[in-house]
Every structure is written in structure tokens, then in C-alpha cells.
Amino acid sequence: MFATVYRCRHEGALMDRLEVQSHPVDGELVVHRRGFNRRIAKLLAKDGETYLIPLLDKVQLLTINDRGVLISGYEMHPPRGSKGSGAIYRQTWWCVTSHVPARERLSPADARAMERARALRREGEEVGRTMSAHSGRR
């Protein structure tokens, strides 16, 4: 669903109302289940692949009312290097939903180009994993 998301925390610390309202982000809000009792929330750009803000892990629904949806979890930042994990902070999102479609219909040529780019990206990632797993092959 299309939503405007207001992040209520910065590096785990609550922000005041004016600070929260000064940085809204619009996109496609997707919440899906990962595993038995774990949910992931992400806000995607119009292309349906790019994260607009870091994803929210271990999502809990706190409130649903006529003003929006309040969800809480842990904000997962990507790692800076190839090893380890990125920073993890407590985060709360206030999501104001809308009926505006987030994705526009792509032309067949654009869809094929995006699929080729995805395939090349997957192939490059596989080569990178192979090269890092077998350092003697360099």
C-alpha cells in the first residue's frame, strides 16, 4: 500500500514532534512474514526494489486508527564492508496510508531492461561470492 512514513526515532532515541514531521518519506509500504513469528517492514521506491529508508525487522503493530498505522521494530542498516552487520536501532514508524498507486505500469521494453539488470546484478554477486570464498582463485 502507498504510505507516507514518519520515522519517530533517530539512532534509537525518540525525536520531538516537529522533528518527526519535518522528514516524511513517501513510498510503497510492504510488511511480510519471515519465519514463524517474525515480520519485516520496508518502504520501497516506485521501481519496487529500492529501499527508501532502512528496513524494519521484528515488526510489531502498535496502533491502527483513522490517522494511520503505528508500527515498531528494529531498524537494520546495511553493513559498511563485506563482513559483519550494520547498525541496529530501535525504531517506530507512523504510517499514513493513501490510495495513490506507488508503482506506474512499465512498458515491456523497460520491464525487460530491469530484468536484464537484475540478472546481471545476481551474476555479479555470485562471482563476488565465489571470488571471496576461494581467495586462491584471484
Image (cartoon, rainbow, N blue to C red):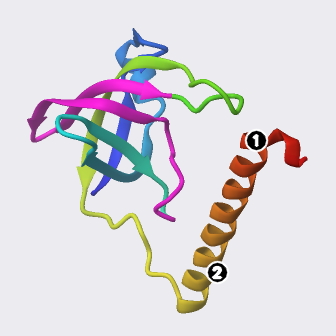
Give the percent coordinates (x, y) of residue 61.
16, 32
Residue 100 x %, y % = 31, 64
Residue 16 vs residue 27, the one in the foreground: 27
Considering only vertical position in the picture, is 20 above or below 13?
below
Asked if residue 6 is among those painted magenta in the image, a careful observer would answer no
How many numbered discs, if any? 2
Q: Nearer the viewer, residue 99 or 55?
A: 55
The CA distance from mark 1 to mark 2 is: 29 Å
Q: Position of residue 69 (x, y in %)?
A: 19, 37
> Which residue is at a point 31% across and 51% down the rendered structure image?
30
Residue type (three-letter) at the residue carrying disc 2? Ala
Give the residues drawn in magenta, as a range. 47-76
Q: Is residue 33 above or below residue 21?
A: below
Q: Quadrant of the N terminus?
A: bottom left
1 or 2: mark nearer the eye: 1
Q: Which residue is mark 1?
A: 132
Q: Which residue matches tag 2?
A: 113
